[in-house]
């Protein structure tokens, strides 16, 4: 059957229910063709290409025929790629980037090199090739190969361009603004370039609309009368909106039971709780044509945003970095270097063979838009970030995309899946079908597919996304019902005390120790197995989803399991093939571990994990007579523990912490985090401050204050977090860490009381495995997303409509960020502004050693003092070892000491390198 003879596919007539006779014959030939390619079938079923199924469903051949007779083929499916036919550029409709059609006569700007920056921006925003010729799909990629045959469970490529009818008109309007000068004979600015810079200022500094109106009016008054600058922010926003990306508003049940979309779009009441969809109409008033919903979900489709990354010259060339970069065996500096990524490639080779396919991480977290002391309100955005980018771009705020804004005023809980439905529908289509995308770096079209490879969240949100409740005795989502946690009757909480000996080697002596852990208990069981995705899916497949039972947990909840639902992520075809589906957040884990250790060791009142209730629980569970108390005792004083410091020691530690000075931007001012009058910490100590203290300062602060065995255990925990939080991970070191962490946890159990061991302390034992499998944690922790949420919080300008306010501000921010990539070099934006201490971007002098050529300025009044002791030697060594010109000598000196241990080499560098280098200079100059 010849492809050029397929006009019958969309040939309609009033006879035979709108079908020509050749249509009936063609459908039969199509089904015969599909049955000749079993690699593209699922058993005896073929993909249905009707306009409803869109090649997403497998059906019996006769059912496919009925569907095609009823609703015809999906638009523009002349090339039967989903049924075994190779991709043929000759049958692809004339489309350009972002799957949109633009008539080539719309502009005559010519080559990209001759365009101004605002003209290039318009071309990239609409995905128009540089020469306005419709690009052809590349022949050097797997979907265009005629020899590649995917496995039966793979999804063949399907090319289905989407034609936006209003795009040509919008594109022409934007071209006019880019061609129109700001005023007569103005050469520096067009109307578009001027408005774009004002929009960037508004978005980056979150200026109020009234402020922008005043600025525009003032600037307009300074320009000639024939200027084209808008006189208000409203008109400026209308002009810039044509460069914006789509946003969809979907009505939702106020209780979060359902979305009013698809087949439920016409409903006016929730089908589960019976709640109203719309705000009530005041008595006596006429019913308005467009009624306002009580609750709205804001959905920002991800596909157009990923397409824009390929359409922009600033980002397109970086989207294949994950394939092109060189890796060192055994070292992991990016998620593409880790086993989870490679395992996914092995499971889905067709997806992996197209390097431009996108892998995404999903994050969800809530924040209080009115602050801690304002109205009790929680807003829950869902964000996506692509991992194709290099480390210096990956996870930056410019490349974190807001995808959903779940309506408040409380956290969605297990009902978050109801709000995730539009996103998961889109991700299923991006996986199975893909979307035609223009790649400006190669000036070609390709079919872009995408996959969510894991989620990132704090621990409570982990339970919301995964479906396994993280509260209570079975709160660990890895150990599940085999965690072995116990209930402490006096502390009234669950404890993971003595739950880590089962992770030890079978013959380890701690397993038989009946004195140091739970009294009289030996451990023989093996560690809980880490279930595969297939095993977990076979377990949860019988449970209802949140869409089916939004207000009821499955049978057996809290008795035999903690599953609250079957997560919506299991609808993704590849979800069961992922090694890591939901990440444990190292940021919050480290913060909670630090708080428990620091507060307990420092014996801070109201914060310590030690107290009378703890000692009574310890009396019941442990054999520690020196710390036991009578169960009937009601006093306040308890025996001092070996892990606690004295009051003078506490004052000395807090004073030392407050006196520490750090390089700029390294840490906040710790003196604000300490209250010396009450000898305690303050609320000013943030998560990053705890990160710095935990990894860098705590072992030093406690060195002389605690017994050796207590100090060494705390130091090992500090070193553990240092190891897994490194920017480059060594796989061999992580394997050793994975073997030693059970011993570390058991040593901690021998020291600390049972109430110390919350779920977060238990999670330490699983962190090395996740780092070894998924790579560096800074691609998978919450720091970047928490800062992104902080930016969203600043955008709440209308407190009566929090979600709508955030959405509108974010859409403008997207336009601003995209345009900032094209600004002239002298335009300073947040993305490319110099560092705070960078006064000049160029060298001060020529022919001067680089370390003496850095610009800078004095800080405060100058003072003089004598250099004491070995300070001159230290300063001299520091300068030489940090000077690029002397780097060859430095490496030569270290190489000459290769026979010594690493710690001795560092000591010899400090003591001998300066004199050795002086001798080398003498040799070279004489």
Image (tube, helix red, strand yellow):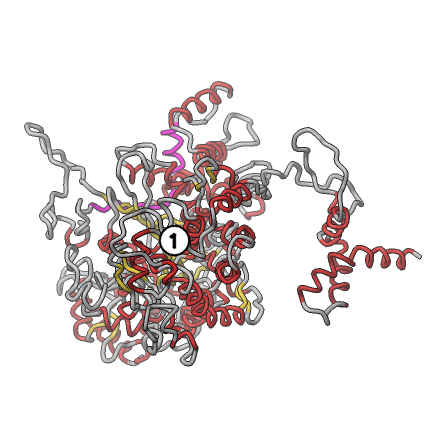
Q: Residue at x 46, y 20 (%)?
A: 218
Question: Can residue 472 be seen here?
Answer: yes
Which residues, given as a range, are shown in magenta?
Answer: 233-251
Q: Quadrant of the C terminus?
A: bottom right
| Figure check: 714 above or below 900 | above
Left or right, 652 with respect to 50, comes to right
Q: Quadrant of residue 547?
A: bottom left
Q: Residue at x 26, y 38 (%)?
A: 376
| Figure check: 130 above or below 214 | below
Q: Position of residue 708 (x, y in %)?
A: 53, 61
Question: Can residue 306 be seen here?
Answer: no
Q: Position of residue 176 (x, y in %)?
A: 44, 36
Q: Quadrant of residue 359?
A: bottom left
- Based on the picture, tell me whether residue 250 belongs to the magenta stretch: yes
Q: Position of residue 5 (x, y in %)?
A: 31, 69
| Figure check: 357 above or below 637 | below
- Based on the picture, tell me whether residue 456 belongs to the magenta stretch: no
- Judging by the rendered image, the residue that carries numbered circle 1 is 639
Q: Quadrant of the N terminus?
A: bottom left
| Figure check: 475 above or below 532 | above
Of residues 232 and 917, the one drawn nearer to the viewer in this rendering: 917
Q: Residue furthest left?
A: 284
Left or right, 729 with respect to 497, comes to right
Q: Quadrant of residue 408?
A: top left
Of residues 207 and 317, the one drawn nearer to the viewer in this rendering: 207
* 10 Å crowding of disc 1: few (<14), some (14-19), many (20+): few
Of residues 15 and 290, the one drawn nearer to the viewer in this rendering: 290
């Amino acid at each position: 059957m010849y492809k050029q003879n397929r006009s019958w596919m969309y040939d309609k007539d009033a006879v035979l229910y709108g079908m020509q006779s050749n249509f009936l014959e063609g459908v039969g030939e199509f089904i015969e063709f599909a049955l000749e390619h079993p690699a593209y079938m699922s058993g005896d079923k073929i993909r249905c290409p009707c306009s409803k199924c869109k090649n997403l469903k497998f059906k019996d051949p006769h059912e496919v025929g009925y569907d095609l007779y009823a609703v015809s083929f999906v638009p523009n499916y002349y090339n039967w790629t989903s049924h075994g036919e190779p991709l043929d550029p000759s049958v692809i409709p004339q489309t350009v980037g972002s799957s949109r059609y633009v008539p080539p006569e719309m502009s005559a700007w010519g080559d990209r090199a001759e365009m101004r920056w605002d003209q290039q921006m318009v071309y990239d925003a609409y995905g128009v090739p540089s020469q306005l010729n419709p690009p052809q799909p590349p022949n050097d990629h797997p979907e265009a190969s005629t020899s590649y045959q995917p496995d039966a469970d793979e999804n063949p490529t399907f090319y289905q361009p989407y034609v936006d009818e209003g795009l040509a008109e919008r594109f022409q309007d934007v071209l006019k603004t880019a061609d129109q000068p700001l005023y007569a004979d103005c050469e520096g600015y067009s109307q578009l370039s001027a408005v774009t810079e004002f929009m960037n200022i508004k978005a980056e500094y979150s200026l109020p609309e009234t402020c922008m109106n005043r600025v525009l009016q003032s600037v307009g008054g300074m320009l000639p009368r024939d200027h084209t600058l808008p006189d208000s922010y409203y008109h400026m926003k209308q002009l810039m909106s044509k460069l914006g990306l789509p946003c969809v508003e979907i009505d939702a049940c106020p209780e979060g039971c359902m979305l009013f979309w698809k087949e439920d779009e016409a409903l006016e009441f929730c089908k589960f709780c019976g709640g109203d969809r719309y705000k009530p109409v005041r008595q006596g008033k006429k019913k308005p044509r467009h009624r306002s919903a009580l609750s709205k979900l804001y959905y920002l489709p991800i596909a157009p945003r990923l397409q824009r990354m390929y359409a922009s010259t600033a980002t397109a060339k970086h989207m294949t970095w994950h394939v092109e970069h060189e890796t060192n065996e055994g070292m992991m500096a990016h998620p593409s270097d880790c086993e989870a990524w490679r395992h996914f490639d092995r499971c889905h080779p067709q997806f992996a063979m197209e390097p431009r396919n996108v892998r995404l991480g999903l994050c969800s977290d809530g924040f209080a838009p009115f602050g801690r002391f304002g109205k009790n309100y929680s807003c829950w955005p869902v964000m996506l970030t692509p991992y194709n980018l290099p480390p210096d771009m990956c996870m930056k705020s410019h490349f974190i995309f807001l995808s959903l804004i779940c309506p408040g005023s409380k956290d969605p809980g297990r009902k978050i899946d109801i709000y995730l439905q539009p996103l998961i529908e889109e991700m299923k289509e991006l996986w199975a079908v893909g979307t035609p995308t223009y790649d400006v770096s190669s000036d070609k079209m390709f079919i872009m597919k995408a996959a969510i490879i894991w989620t990132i969240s704090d621990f409570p949100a982990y339970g919301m996304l995964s479906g396994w409740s993280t509260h209570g005795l079975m709160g660990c989502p890895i150990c599940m019902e085999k965690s072995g946690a116990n209930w402490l009757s006096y502390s009234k909480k669950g404890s993971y005390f003595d739950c880590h000996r089962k992770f030890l080697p079978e013959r380890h002596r701690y397993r038989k120790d009946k004195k140091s852990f739970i009294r009289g208990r030996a451990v023989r069981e093996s560690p809980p197995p880490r279930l595969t995705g297939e095993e977990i899916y076979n377990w949860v497949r019988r449970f209802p989803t949140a869409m089916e039972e939004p207000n009821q947990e499955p049978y057996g909840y809290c008795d035999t399991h903690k599953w609250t639902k079957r997560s919506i992520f299991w609808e993704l075809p590849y979800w069961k093939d992922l090694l890591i589906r939901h990440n444990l957040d190292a940021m919050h884990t480290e913060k909670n571990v630090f708080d428990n250790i620091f507060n307990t060791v420092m014996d801070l009142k109201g914060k310590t994990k030690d107290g009378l209730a703890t000692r009574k629980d310890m009396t019941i569970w442990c054999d520690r007579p020196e710390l036991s108390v009578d169960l009937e005792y009601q006093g306040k004083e308890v025996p001092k523990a070996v892990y606690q410091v004295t009051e003078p020691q506490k004052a000395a530690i807090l004073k030392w912490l407050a006196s520490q000075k750090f390089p700029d931007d390294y840490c906040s001012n710790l003196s604000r985090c300490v209250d010396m009058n009450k000898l305690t910490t303050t609320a000013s100590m943030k998560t990053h401050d705890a990160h710095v203290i935990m990894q860098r300062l705590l072992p030093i602060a406690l060195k002389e204050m605690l017994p050796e065995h207590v100090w060494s255990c705390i130091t090992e925990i500090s070193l553990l977090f240092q190891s897994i939080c490194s920017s480059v991970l060594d796989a061999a070191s992580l394997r050793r860490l994975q073997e030693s962490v059970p011993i570390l946890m058991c040593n901690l159990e021998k020291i600390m009381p049972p109430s110390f061991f919350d779920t977060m302390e238990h999670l330490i034992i699983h962190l090395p495995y996740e780092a070894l499998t998924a790579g560096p944690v800074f691609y998978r922790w919450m720091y970047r997303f928490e800062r992104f949420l902080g930016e969203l919080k600043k955008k709440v300008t209308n407190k009566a409509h929090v979600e709508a306010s955030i959405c509108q501000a974010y859409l403008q921010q997207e336009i601003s960020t995209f345009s900032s990539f094209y600004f002239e070099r002298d335009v300073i934006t947040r993305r490319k502004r110099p560092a705070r201490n960078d006064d000049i971007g160029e060298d001060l002098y020529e022919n001067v050693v680089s370390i003496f050529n850095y610009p800078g300025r004095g800080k405060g009044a100058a003072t003089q003092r004598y250099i004491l002791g070995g300070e001159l030697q230290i300063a001299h060594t520091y300068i030489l070892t940090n000077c690029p010109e002397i780097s060859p000598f430095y490496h030569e000196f270290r190489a000459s000491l290769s026979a010594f241990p690493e710690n001795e080499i560092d000591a010899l560098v400090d003591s001998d390198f300066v004199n050795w280098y002086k001798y080398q200079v003498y040799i070279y100059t004489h």
